[in-house]
Structures are given as structure tokens and as C-alpha cells.
Image: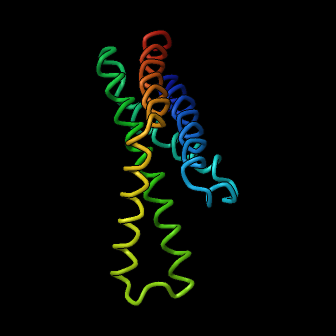
Amino acid sequence: MPTAARLIAAIFMAGTGIILALELRELRESLKYFAYFIEYNASLGAIVGWNLVGNRVGQGWARAAAAGISGGFVTLMLVVFSLAFREMLNRAFRKFYDHALEAILAALKIGITDFLAISATVAILPVFMGAVLSGLGAEAAERRWR
């Protein structure tokens, strides 16, 4: 059922997805030419905000912040591993892999490498802050508009 908390969480997590897209574009040069990359990340963030963060608010500020953090982590994982899968498909169409299992393992390796690259830098901090604000904003909306 649509609530104000779900809407606010979706909007804030979409903003977090946009921040994540801008950070990932600086990390990998090939993403600068990926059409609709920012919109893709914003839509993933909005879906996670609506379904995960917006559902779990209304039980206090600390739990709302934790819900936002888990939503940010899920958004990060979805974005990174969907991009890894896309890169694997690009390589597979160029006959880079011999077997399907080799392609799947390469997608996992690409995803883990990208995740470690973004989490080892200061670039993860804006994503973390946006996720916390998403949870806290959804909690404020839940308390105000019941």
C-alpha cells in the first residue's frame, strides 16, 4: 500500500542511486558512454527505497537509519553486479569466454573488483550518507503523515 514513507524513501534512494552513478562513472571510464546510466541507477534506488526502506520504518530513528543503510548496501550491490553482468555479456558476444561457467565467474570477479574499488575509497561516503538520510526521511514522513 502506498504511503508517504515509501514515497520519501524512494525519492531519497533515487538520489542515492544518482550519487552512486556519478561515483561509478569516475571509477570506470567505459561507463561515461553507457546511455541512461544515471536513470538506471536512480530507478534501482527508487525500487529499493520503495520496497525495502519504506517498509521497515516506523519503529524508531535507529532502526530507520539501519533500514536506510541496508537499502544503500542493496542498491550498491544491485548496481555493481548488474554492471558486471552487462560487461560480461559484452565480452561474451565478442567470444572472449570458452564456457558459460567461465563467463559467470568472470562476472562475479568484475563485480567484486568494482565493489572493492568503490568501497576502498572515500566515494562510498556520499552513498552511505544518502542511505542514512533516506531512512531518516522516511521515518520523519511516517511520523508526520500517518
Coordinates of residue 76 in the picture (x, y in percent):
43, 45
Question: Image point 36% across, 65% down: which residue?
Answer: 109
Name of the residue lying farthest toward the top = 144
Coordinates of residue 101 in the picture (x, y in percent):
33, 81
Question: Image point 67% across, 54% down: which residue?
Answer: 32
Snapshot colouring: rainbow
Q: Is residue 140 above or below residue 43?
A: above
Question: Image point 53% across, 25% down: which residue?
Answer: 8
**Depth order, front residue of 139/38:** 38
Number of marks drawn: 0
Coordinates of residue 10 in the picture (x, y in percent):
53, 33
**Depth order, front residue of 143/132:** 132
**Depth order, front residue of 132/126:** 126
Q: Is residue 36 above or below residue 19?
A: below
The image quadrant of residue 58 is top left
Quadrant including the C terminus: top left
Please indicate whether residue 136 sits to the left or right of residue 90 in the image: left
Question: Image point 45% across, 54% down: which residue?
Answer: 80
Please indicate whether residue 30 sits to the left or right of residue 9 in the image: right
Coordinates of residue 113 in the picture (x, y in percent):
39, 57
Q: Is residue 27 above or below residue 57?
A: below
